[in-house]
Image (cartoon, rainbow, N blue to C red):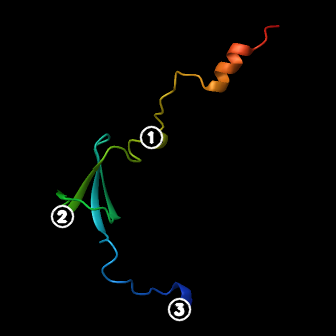
Amino acid sequence: MAPPPSLESKPVKPGIHPEYRKVLFHDTTADVYFLIGSTVATTETKEYEGETYPYMMIDISSASHPVYTGKQRVSQNDGRIAKFNKRYTRKS
C-alpha cells in the first residue's frame, strides 16, 4: 500500500538546508556521551567507539538535569504567597 500523496517524500531545495549528521554530545556535568543526529555547527571532532564524530560539549542533559534524575534541590526560600500568609495570618 503506497502512502498518501501528501506524505510522499519530496526533494528539498539544494544549498539552503544545514548538514544533518551524527554529532557526539558530551554532558560534562555527568560525564556522559550521547550520539545524536543534529545540524549543530561544530569545529571540534572526537573519536567515539572507533569512529570520529563532530563534538559538542554541553553543561546539562537528561543525565544531569534534576527533573530527570530526581535529585532536585529544595528551595529554602518561601514564595511570595507563603510569606504573605505567614505575615498576615490571624491568630485565634
> 62 left or right of 32?
right
Up/down of 33 relative to 79, above or below: below
Label ID, residue 51: 2
Q: Please state which amino acid type lies under the numbered disc 2.
A: Glu
What is the CA distance from the residue labelled 3 to the residue labelled 2?
37 Å
Label ID, residue 69: 1
At x 68%, y 20%, the residue is 84
Who is closer to the viewer here, 67 or 87? 87
Q: Position of residue 91 (x, y in %)?
A: 79, 8
Q: Please state which amino acid type lies under the numbered disc 1.
A: Thr
Up/down of 60 relative to 55, above or below: above
Q: Please state which amino acid type lies under the numbered disc 3.
A: Ala
What residue is shown with label 3? 2
Q: Position of residue 23 (x, y in %)?
A: 28, 61
The image quadrant where one finds the C terminus is top right
User: Which quarter of the picture shows residue 24?
Assistant: bottom left
> 80 left or right of 57?
right
At x 38%, y 47%, the residue is 61
> 84 left or right of 34?
right
For the residues labelled 2 and 1, say whether their Cβ atoms are less than 8 Å apart.
Answer: no
